[in-house]
Amino acid sequence: MKICNFRIPPAIAAAAVLAWGCADAQKRAAGFEEEFELSVGGKEFSAQVAVTDSEKARGLMFRDFLKEDGGMVFVYDSPQRASFWMKNTKIPLDLAFFTADGTLTEVKKLYPNNLDPVASSRDDITYCIEMNSGWFSKNGVYPPAKLDMRKLEAAIGARK
């Protein structure tokens, strides 16, 4: 390769092309499997962020294990009454409901493979978080604890 009367050795040209490709890759959206460091009520956890309808429908199905401080955040486009069931979900979970400003409104129990819907008592829910059963009480996280919205918005932005 020759640029401006200078010859660039092939190894340097290849490195430049590779670096350019890596920079471009960093601009791509994070995948569904990626975990983000988040916090609620000052307690840190890592979670996948489900933003598409298919990701929300899949949730934590077919998993045998969820790490101690691991979970999943479900993001809704507009406030609503949220409802979950545990089809093909083997792990007992806690389900937390949050308003658009990140306020925890309630935590409910979800039992493995239970097909009965578990719904929020309110219709202004924008985020839901599934964690291992007992995580919220073990960590002293009760309503009206707050999500760290700066971290959550960064994670959502990385997914889109």
Image (cartoon, grey):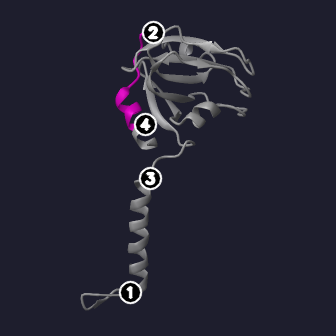
Q: CA distance from mark 4 to mark 2?
A: 23 Å
Which is closer to the viewer, label 1 or label 3? 3
Q: Is residue 153 magenta?
A: yes
Q: Position of residue 84 (x, y in %)?
A: 62, 20
- 24 above or below 79? below
Dot placed on the residue nearer the N-terminal end, 4 or 2: 2
- Secondary element under disc 2, as helix, strand or loop, is loop
Which segment is the magenta one? Answer: 144-156
Residue 9 is marked as 1
Amino acid found under the numbered disc labelled 2: Pro
Q: Give the overall secondary structure of the magenta segment.
A: helix
Mark 3 near mark 4, Cβ–Cβ under 8 Å?
no
Residue drawn at the location 50% of the way across and 16% of the way down: 97
Q: Which residue is mark 3?
A: 28
Mark 4 near mark 2, Cβ–Cβ under 8 Å?
no
Q: Quadrant of residue 41?
A: top left
79 or 128: nearer the eye? 79
In the picture, the quarter occupied by the N terminus is bottom left
Q: Is residue 135 visible?
A: no
Q: Which residue is mark 4?
A: 156
- 71 above or below 106? below
Q: CA distance from mark 1 to mark 2?
A: 62 Å
- Secondary element under disc 3, as helix, strand or loop, is loop
Amino acid found under the numbered disc labelled 3: Arg
Q: Position of residue 50 (x, y in %)?
A: 53, 34
Dot placed on the residue nearer the N-terminal end, 2 or 3: 3
Amino acid found under the numbered disc labelled 1: Pro
Dot placed on the residue nearer the N-terminal end, 4 or 1: 1
Q: CA distance from mark 1 to mark 3?
A: 30 Å
Q: Which residue is mark 2?
A: 143
